[in-house]
Amino acid sequence: MTDEQRQNLRPTLNLAPATAPLERFQNETLRPIAKLQNDLLIATLNIFLAKRKVKMDQVAVKQRFDKVKELVARDNRLRGLLFGIIIGQFTAAEMAFYGEWEGDINRRLTNLLTERLTESVR
C-alpha cells in the first residue's frame, strides 16, 4: 500500500489548526488513525481483558480511566499491540517524524488511547 493510499483511508476530522509540530502530528496523524482503527483497538482491549480476567464492569465508573491508563501505560504486551495498530498506519515521512519525537509522541498516544478506550468500556 502506498503512502497516499494509506492517507486516503483516514477519516477527515474537524479540529482546530495546530501550529506546534507535535500537536499538528497528533491532530493530522494520530487522531485520524485512531478513529480509523477504533474497532480494532477496542477488540484488542476486550481480548486482552478477557485473557487477563479483568472485569471492567466490576471497576467503579470513576476508576475506569485510571485502570485503562494503567493497563496501556504499564502492560508492555497490550501497549505494543495498541501502538502497533496505530504505527502500522504511518507513512514513511510520519515514521521518520516519529523516530525524532518518539518519547513525546508515545506520551500523546498513551493519553489518546486511554481516552478512546475508556469510552468504549463504559
Image (cartoon, rainbow, N blue to C red):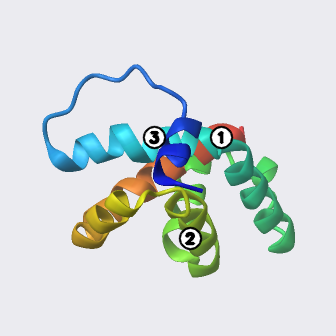
Residue 73 at x, y percent in the picture: 48, 68
Task: Name the quarter where the N terminus is drawn.
Answer: bottom right
- Quick one: label 2 or label 3, which is nearer the N terminus? 3
Label 3: how many Cα within 10 Å (few below 14, some 14–19, many 20+): many
Question: Separation of disc 2 and disc 3 at Cα?
Answer: 17 Å
Q: Is residue 33 above or below residue 2?
A: above
Q: Residue visible at 53% across and 36% down?
A: 8
Q: Are marks 2 and 3 in contact (CB under 8 Å)?
A: no
Q: Are marks 1 and 2 in contact (CB under 8 Å)?
A: no
Q: Residue visible at 54% across and 30% down?
A: 11
Nearest the eye: 20 or 88? 88
Question: Separation of disc 1 and disc 2 at Cα?
Answer: 22 Å
Nearest the eye: 74 or 34? 34
Residue type indicated by callout 3: Arg
What's the mark number on residue 11?
none
Residue 103 at x, y percent in the picture: 28, 70
The residue that disc 1 covers is 61
What's the mark number on residue 31?
3
SS for callout 1 = helix
Q: Residue visible at 29% across and 72% down?
A: 99
Label 1: how many Cα within 10 Å (few below 14, some 14–19, many 20+): few
Residue 39 at x, y percent in the picture: 73, 44
Q: Residue visible at 13% across and 35% down?
A: 19
Q: Is residue 26 above or below residue 97?
A: above
Work out whether residue 70 can be spotted. yes
- Quick one: label 3 or label 1, which is nearer the N terminus? 3
Q: Quadrant of residue 94?
A: bottom left
Residue type indicated by callout 1: Val
Question: Separation of disc 3 and disc 1 at Cα?
Answer: 24 Å
The residue that disc 2 covers is 79
Residue type indicated by callout 2: Arg
